[in-house]
Amino acid sequence: MKEYKILLTGTVGAGKTTAIGRVSETSPVMTDVPNSDTSVAKERTTVGLDFGQLTLDNGDRIRLFGTPGQARFDFLWKILVRNALGVIVLMDNSRPDPLDDLSTYMHGFASALRSLPCVIGVGRTESHPVPSLDDYAERLAAMGRVFPILGVDVRRRTDVILLVDTLLMQLEADARGETE
């Protein structure tokens, strides 16, 4: 059995805690406290990390770590990304400028993303269709990045599994490329 670490990051309210809770086979560890940021309509927010575990069909275990969303905790981002095999970035399309938010996370994880695969999960696209997934792809391209971008609802276990599977497929493709 192998164990893999995957990091979930993204804006406040994007659903990192929810995503981990949807797929974790153990009671997730959460460091939520009452939210004091009045610009976000949310009762609680993560100030440390979230943690959950998921076992794959082959017996391998995924350890999921979630970061706090606020940029003021970027020092934790750098700690939590250590030894990760990949990064899932969750975006909230209902925020005032989600493309700017994407830039924040691409810059905040720039060093790690030079070598790690990444997938972008965009939530709340049904109620907020703009920006489109193509707009996200264009923003990434302008930064010299190409990552899979998926519309997701992290309240659905299948959507969270899709994000994890997409990341694992990138790892598998990279491993095949190295052996050829």
Image: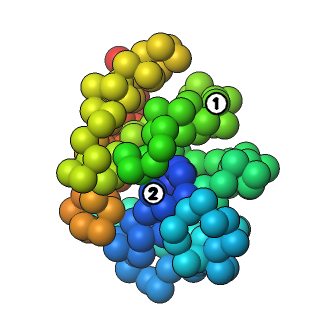
| Residue at 69%, 72% in the rendered image | 36
Near-viewer residue (11 or 63)? 11
Dividing the picture into quadrants, the one containing residue 18 is bottom left
Taking the image as shown, residue 153 lies to the left or right of residue 64, namely left
Report x, y in % for residue 119. 39, 40
**From this viewpoint, is residue 9 visible?**
yes
Q: Residues within 10 Å of mark 2 (few under 14, many from 20)?
A: many
| Residue at 58%, 48% in the rendered image | 84
Near-viewer residue (106 or 178)? 106
Which amino acid, by three-letter code, is at mark 2? Ala
Q: Which mark sits nearer the N-terminus, 2 or 1?
A: 2
Q: Residues within 10 Å of mark 1 (few under 14, many from 20)?
A: few
Report x, y in % for residue 60. 39, 62
Q: Report the label total.
A: 2
Taking the image as shown, residue 10 lies to the left or right of residue 134, namely right
Near-viewer residue (61 or 70)? 70
Which amino acid, by three-letter code, is at mark 1? His
Mark 2–mark 1 Cα distance, whole angstroms, equals: 18 Å
Near-viewer residue (24 or 137)? 137
- Tag 2 secondary structure: loop
> Where, quadrant-wise, is the C terminus in this rendering?
top left
Contact between labelled residues 1 and 2, with CB atoms less than 8 Å apart: no
Taking the image as shown, residue 41 lies to the left or right of residue 160, namely right
Report x, y in % for residue 122. 35, 46
Q: Which dot marks residue 128?
A: none
The colouring scheme, among rainbow, by chain, secondary structure or one colour, is rainbow
Q: Which residue is mark 1?
A: 107
- The answer to whether 22 is drawn above or below residue 141 in the figure is below
**From this viewpoint, is residue 59 visible?**
no
Q: Which residue is mark 2?
A: 14
